[in-house]
Structures are given as structure tokens and as C-alpha cells.
Image (tube, coloured by chain):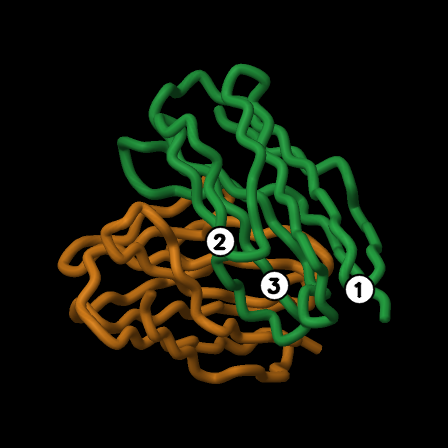
Amino acid sequence: SAVISQKPSRDICQRGTSLTIQCQVDSQVTMMFWYRQQPGQSLTLIATANQGSEATYESGFVIDKFPISRPNLTFSTLTVSNMSPEDSSIYLCSVDRGRDTQYFGPGTRLTVL
Amino acid sequence: AQTVTQSQPEMSVQEAETVTLSCTYDTSENNYYLFWYKQPPSRQMILVIRQEAYKQQNATENRFSVNFQKAAKSFSLKISDSQLGDTAMYFCAFMKGTGGFKTIFGAGTRLFVKA
């Protein structure tokens, strides 16, 4: 498995502001993934982030709202921009360690007022 | 497109007893992987068990085992000797064997283990 950390673990933000979530992995990985889990719901993939290239976004998610950076093979950030209460969710990053299995970070709980 | 269905929103089991969580999926792929993840109140997603579709033998991990029925597209999770720490949300998930690592998750089953 992988050791994955996320910062912050939780935050409360005001409408219209932006929050950047960091994801750090203990070893190099090719692909990192960002998921959203709305209250009481399942996980939905936001985007896949490869180092050195633009992130690939899933249907319903756009780069202007969820810009992603992937500066190296152990780190990625997800920004939630111009937030509204509907963005209140848990945001999780995950990685694949070569066994075609995703391992998840502890998640960031975001509340937008 | 692939779909994953968990028809049991909530279940409960007495400590030390056995419980089975159901999952069905739909795909036209022949090469894929299936997973059960556990999410306790701490919200950390933990991999419970993994099954490769090409393997006929059901995966087991200690008290956790699966009943994988490929033709029926069914993938149930059996938890034996249930413990209080098994209380969590359980998600069934599907990943194609080729063409990327996108994982599709079911809606989840909330399991309560009662003392």
C-alpha cells in the first residue's frame, strides 16, 4: 500500500473563496486521482493527474472550477474555486501503485458557508 | 458504460455473526478488477479485498471473502466473525483492466455491528 497524506484535513470556507488541497505520497507514482464525495453519497472521480501533462477531467467537472497541479511524481494539488455551499464535500486523492488498485488519502472535509 | 449497484443501503449484524453484502455490476469488458472498500467514520477509504475477473477462485483476506459470479455479474462480500470495528460504509467498486484506472463505485452499504 501507499502512505498518502492530505492537507488540510478539514476546512470551513466562505462562499466565493477558493481552497487548495494538497496530496503527498510517500513514493513516486505515475497517476494520481481526485474524487469528490458529497454528503451521504458515493465517490465520484473529478480528474486524473499525470505528472508533466494536463489533468484529464470527467464529465461534469471543468478545469476553471477544479484546477489541478502535478509538479512531480509525489505531489498534487486540487483547487476548489469560487466555492458555493454545493461544493461542501469530502475530497479524496488516490494513487495506483501498479497493482491496478487505488489507495486513498484520508480525505479533506470541506464546508462552504 | 460500467455500473455498480449495491441494493442494500443499510445492514446490521450481531457481533461474532456472519453478514453478506451484495453487489452487482454491468460491463461488456472481459478483463477487469473488482474491489470492496471500507470507509469508517474517520472517512479513510480502506481496501478490504480485490478480485481479478480472470481468476475463478474467490479472493479471501482473513475474515473477509467474496463470492464472485462472473456470469451473473455478482460480487458479494462475506464478513465472518463480525467485530465492532467492522462498523463502516462499504463500497463495491469496478475498474477496467485496460485503458486507464478509472474506478466506478457503488452507492455503498452502511453496516452496523451490534454488541
- Which chain is in green here? B
Q: Nearer the viewer, residue A23 or B70?
A: B70
Q: Chain of mark 1?
A: B
Label 2, residues with CA under 10 Å away: few <14, some 14-19, many ≥20: few
Q: Which residue is depicted at the point 85% across and 71% down?
A: B115
Q: Which residue is depicted at the point 31% across and 46% down?
A: A100
Instruction: Work out whether A71 lies above or below B5.
Output: below
Q: Nearer the viewer, residue B27 or A93?
A: B27
Q: Which residue is depicted at the point 43% across and 31% down?
A: B57
Residue A58 on image: x %, y %: 43, 43
Residue position for label 2: B61
Q: Quadrant of the C terminus of chain A?
A: bottom right
Residue position for label 1: B15
Q: Which mark is drawn over residue B100? A: none
Label 3, residues with CA under 10 Å away: few <14, some 14-19, many ≥20: some
Residue position for label 3: B39
Q: Is residue A13 left or right of residue B83?
A: left
Residue A53 on image: x %, y %: 17, 54
Q: Amino acid at mark 3?
A: Gln
Q: Colour of chain A?
A: orange
Say which label, 3 or 1, has the lower sequence index: 1
Q: Amino acid at mark 1?
A: Glu
